[in-house]
Amino acid sequence: MAEDVIFLDPPPYSWRTRKISIRPARWYVVVELDRDGYADTHGAEAAVLPAGVVEAADRLRSAAMDRIYVDGYTGNFSWGSGDRTITLFMPFPYVDDAVSALRAAEEARDGSKLDSLATQLALPIDDWLSPGERQLRRGVDFDARPHTFLRFLRAKAHQQGLRLNGRATPSGVWIRPQLSRIEQLSRAAFPEEYVDRPDRWSMAMTVVFGSTRAA
């Protein structure tokens, strides 16, 4: 895939022209809507995208980055805030869909394509990290190398305040997520800070290799 630029305004093109740039890298493709110059020259109304559109772009970016990480990428991503430039990092098969979604977001102020693509790319991380021991099978639940997938799950578990016991096998991974001791104490001391993150462990049954006991 080669670099490309798609102009959203008629010629002649200048720094004021809205455009979508496509820049491939090794693990992903940067798909970026640049409306900075256009916003400067067309006033406040043109400069502001609806909040729902920006939020949909954020959701898509997050879902797409998870996909890239689960494939084995270990680097970082960098992007700016605001709505003058919307930067997405996309797996190669979804570049055309991302371009179409950004075009609809800019020209029609419609974030539905961004939302739809975010839903399509979203991984079932909460299901994978729900209480209990489980096997996730390569080729069924995931396609990456098992050790790569387990590394991804450990990072996601850490972000949620979980300790992930797990092991990789040639056919998949065995995992058992648990709340870390620090997270247990924090939830008990500051329950108001966790209203958007319900405790799925306190009333769950903890499965321990071959036996079951109440948590």
Image (tube, rainbow, N blue to C red):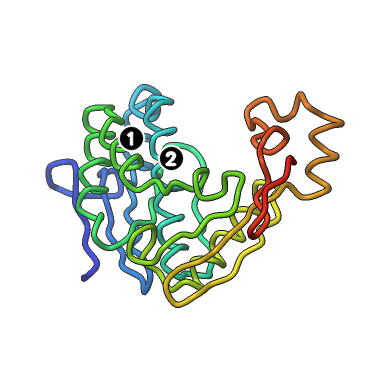
Q: Give the residue type that dot 2 points to.
A: Arg
Residue pictured at 21% horizontal, 70% vertical: 1
Cα–Cα span, label 1 and label 2: 7 Å
From the viewer's perspective, is 167 left or right of 92? Answer: right
Task: Say what amino acid the circle numbered 1 marks.
Answer: Asp
Label 1, residues with CA under 10 Å away: few <14, some 14-19, many ≥20? some
Q: Measuring from the top left, give residue 207's x and y in whole percent.
A: 65, 50
Answer left or right for 123 relative to 74.
left
Most extreme residue toward the front is 211
- Do the numbered discs 1 and 2 sit on residues whose CB atoms are within 8 Å? yes
Q: Residue at x 83, y 38 (%)?
A: 186
Which quadrant is home to the C terminus? top right
Q: Which residue is mark 1?
A: 115
Quickly name the residue at label 2: 59
Q: Residue at x 87, y 31 (%)?
A: 189
Please name the residue shown 65% across and 46% down the image: 160
Q: Residues within 10 Å of mark 2 (few under 14, many from 20)?
A: some
Whole-percent x, y for residue 63 in the image = 42, 48
Residue 66 lies, with reference to residue 18, above or below; the image says below
Residue 68 lies in quadrant: bottom left
Q: Secondary structure at mark 1?
A: helix
Near-viewer residue (62 or 162): 162
Numbered disc 2: secondary structure: helix
Q: What is the number of the mark on residue 55?
A: none
Task: Identify which residue, 133 or 95, lies in the foreground.
Answer: 133
Sequence-first disc among 1 and 2: 2
Q: Nearer the viewer, residue 13 or 83?
A: 83
